């Protein structure tokens, strides 16, 4: 029997679509190149955002999708796709209510305002029971643990047919219709057919060549994305005429440490530096760029402004400088580490360095020595005078005076990718000529973060739209 729906990619959007379509009795086939389902649900921090949910109502929080949308316009400076972002915020509350009906265990603090990215004006970010950062290394797996058993239940019941270790290699098109998905597995090449096709293959933040080709080309990709996020769906859809946009709206998360220099990889759950705001932790460090100079207020400014300033720095990287006193005063700048672990890491001299003088430290990190010395001297004077005329930093309690001194090299790094395949309001894939494929749909990060978040980070606006659009298509196709 011809499948009703063929889904490529058993990740966040794919398994949600499969569950919803199977619930309606549709014949669903899922193709997945990995040997298991879940995709980025294995790695995500699990922050969801929605306005007007049952949980907000129970907690007396008055909020609406209109206000959520207005916040996205404000944070992204109107750079999102209005049709897609609007659809995402309109669907979001019913998605959260659906998750709750399935038994999603909200953390008692949810919904809350999160400061890791530019904050929303209302508490509308949701975390699961296992996602709160009391243990900084506890990954956001609440969603995975909720959805995967349901997906597996439908597979066992014969309602979903899934093919693991099966990679989509191309899309077969006749006119405005897709007639098959070409896959490769250990049995060879197959053309898989269905009435409707859904691409949920995720982003391209683990494909350095593709990233380079679609962004400015100058910056090396430093990433912590799922290694299977290689843009396969985008590449295949473009090859058959789909329109791609948004890559120039690339934004990055701050604080990535490349513990193996040259690897291009950051371990999000293992070690990153907390430099994204001055709310979650007071910044005791100063930040210097390749010229050995401070370039921003390290303490008072919000996440979005920080992200934009760092994107302007050469190679999108900077060095933290601090002294021994700052290392031990309060929480470690790398939240997963103790000060002793940081000192141990400095022995390797790969991403963290330690020296007895600022001059020696500047030599080790290979920055202009005189400039670094001058920067530190000037900053120490600002601490004495309790005034920073350069950047107006208000927190000046930590002059660099107590040896040894430390430096950490941090990058603006990628969890997600911003460019994506364009879709219309029904989530049908749009062609270069502006028409659309009748039976080819796309959902999730394949649409690009810029569609729902613009040239900025709007909290929860990847994961929630991936679930919402997956659910919407599973409910309708
Ligand atoms: C560390 C981290 C933290 C994050 N935290 C948040 C957060 O808190 N809030 C938020 O909103 N977003 C967050 N995100 C982003 C969000 O989790 C993802 O954008 C979202 O989960 C992507 O869902 P998806 O369904 O599009 O893709 P995925 O979940 O990545 O699924 C894609 C699937 O397609 C498969 N696939 C790829 N190519 C092929 C092919 N050729 N053939 C067959 N199968 C293929 C992959 O193996 C994968 O299983 C985070 C991302 C990361 C990496």
Image (cartoon, rainbow, N blue to C red):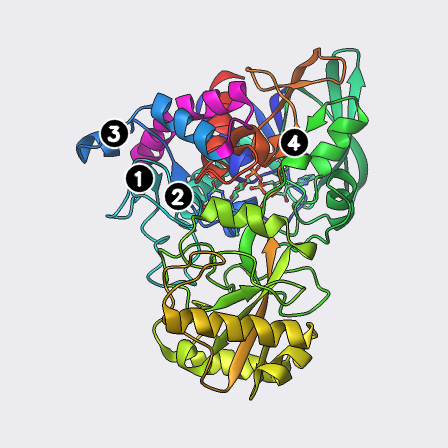
Q: Where does the magenta region start and end?
A: 76-102
* Mark 2, secondary structure of its residue: helix
Q: Which mark is residue 54?
A: 3
Residue 449 location (% of width, % of height): 57, 35
| For residue 373, above or below residue 296 | below
What is the C-alpha distance between the residues marked 2 and 3? 19 Å
Quick check: marks 1 and 3 in contact, CB under 8 Å?
Answer: no
The image quadrant where one finds ligand 1 is top right
Residue 187 location (% of width, % of height): 79, 42
The mark that comes first in sequence, 1 or 3, is: 3
Q: Which mark is residue 146?
A: 2
Quick check: marks 1 and 2 in contact, CB under 8 Å?
Answer: yes
Task: Say few, some or many: other residues with alpha carbon within 10 Å of mark 3 (under 14 / 14 to 19 / 20 or more).
Answer: some
Task: Say few, some or many: other residues with alpha carbon within 10 Å of mark 1 (under 14 / 14 to 19 / 20 or more).
Answer: few
* Mark 3, secondary structure of its residue: helix
Viewer-closest of 263 and 302:
302
What is the C-alpha distance between the residues marked 4 and 2? 32 Å
The yes-or-no answer for disc 2 within 8 Å of ligand 1 is no
What is the C-alpha distance between the residues marked 1 and 2? 7 Å
What is the C-alpha distance between the residues marked 1 and 3? 14 Å
| For residue 156, above or below residue 279 | above
The mark that comes first in sequence, 4 or 2, is: 2
Q: Which residue is mark 1?
A: 103
Q: Quadrant of the N terminus?
A: top right
The mark that comes first in sequence, 1 or 2, is: 1
| For residue 2, above or below residue 421 | above
């Amino acid at each position: 029997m011809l499948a009703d729906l063929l889904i490529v990619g058993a990740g966040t959007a794919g398994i949600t679509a499969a569950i919803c379509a199977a619930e309606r009795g549709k014949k669903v086939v899922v193709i997945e190149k990995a040997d298991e389902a879940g995709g980025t649900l294995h790695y995500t921090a699990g922050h969801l955002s929605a306005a007007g949910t049952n949980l907000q109502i129970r907690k007396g929080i008055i909020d609406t999708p209109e206000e959520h949308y207005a916040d996205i316009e404000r944070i992204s400076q109107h750079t999102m796709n209005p049709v897609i972002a609007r659809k995402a915020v309109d669907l979001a509350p019913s998605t959260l209510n659906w998750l709750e009906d399935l038994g999603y265990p909200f953390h008692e603090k949810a919904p809350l305002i999160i400061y890791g990215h530019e904050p929303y004006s209302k508490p509308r970010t949701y975390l699961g029971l296992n996602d709160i950062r009391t243990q900084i290394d506890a990954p956001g797996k609440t969603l995975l643990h909720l959805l995967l058993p349901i997906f597996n239940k439908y597979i066992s019941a014969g309602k979903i047919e899934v093919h693991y270790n099966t990679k989509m290699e191309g899309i077969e098109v006749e006119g405005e219709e897709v007639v098959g998905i070409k896959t490769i597995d250990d049995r060879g090449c197959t053309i898989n057919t269905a009435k409707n096709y859904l691409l949920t293959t995720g982003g391209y933040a683990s494909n350095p060549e593709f990233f380079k080709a679609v962004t400015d080309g100058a910056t090396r990709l430093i990433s912590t994305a799922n290694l299977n996020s290689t843009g396969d769906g985008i590449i295949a859809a473009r090859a058959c005429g789909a329109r791609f946009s948004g890559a120039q709206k690339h934004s990055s998360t701050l604080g990535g440490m490349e513990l193996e220099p040259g690897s291009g990889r950051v371990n999000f759950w293992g070690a990153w530096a907390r430099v994204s705001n001055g709310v979650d932790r007071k910044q005791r460090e100063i930040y210097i760029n390749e010229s050995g100079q401070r370039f921003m207020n390290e303490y008072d400014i919000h996440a979005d402004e920080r992200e934009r300033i760092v994107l302007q720095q050469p190679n999108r990287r900077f060095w933290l400088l601090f002294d021994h006193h700052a290392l031990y005063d309060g929480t470690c700048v790398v939240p997963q580490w103790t000060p002793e672990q940081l000192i141990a890491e400095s022995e390797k001299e790969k991403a963290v360095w330690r020296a007895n003088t600022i001059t020696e430290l500047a030599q080790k990190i290979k920055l202009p020595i005189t400039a670094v010395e001058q920067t530190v001297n000037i900053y120490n004077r600002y601490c004495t005078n309790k005034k920073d005329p350069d950047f107006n930093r208000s927190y000046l309690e930590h002059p660099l005076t107590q040896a040894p001194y430390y430096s950490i090299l941090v990058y603006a790094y990628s969890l997600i990718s911003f460019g994506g395949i364009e879709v219309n309001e029904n989530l049908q894939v749009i062609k270069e000529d502006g028409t659309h494929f009748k039976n080819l749909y796309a959902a999730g990060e394949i649409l690009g973060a810029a569609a729902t978040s613009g040239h900025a980070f709007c909290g929860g606006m990847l994961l929630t739209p991936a679930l919402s659009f997956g659910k919407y298509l599973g409910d309708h196709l």
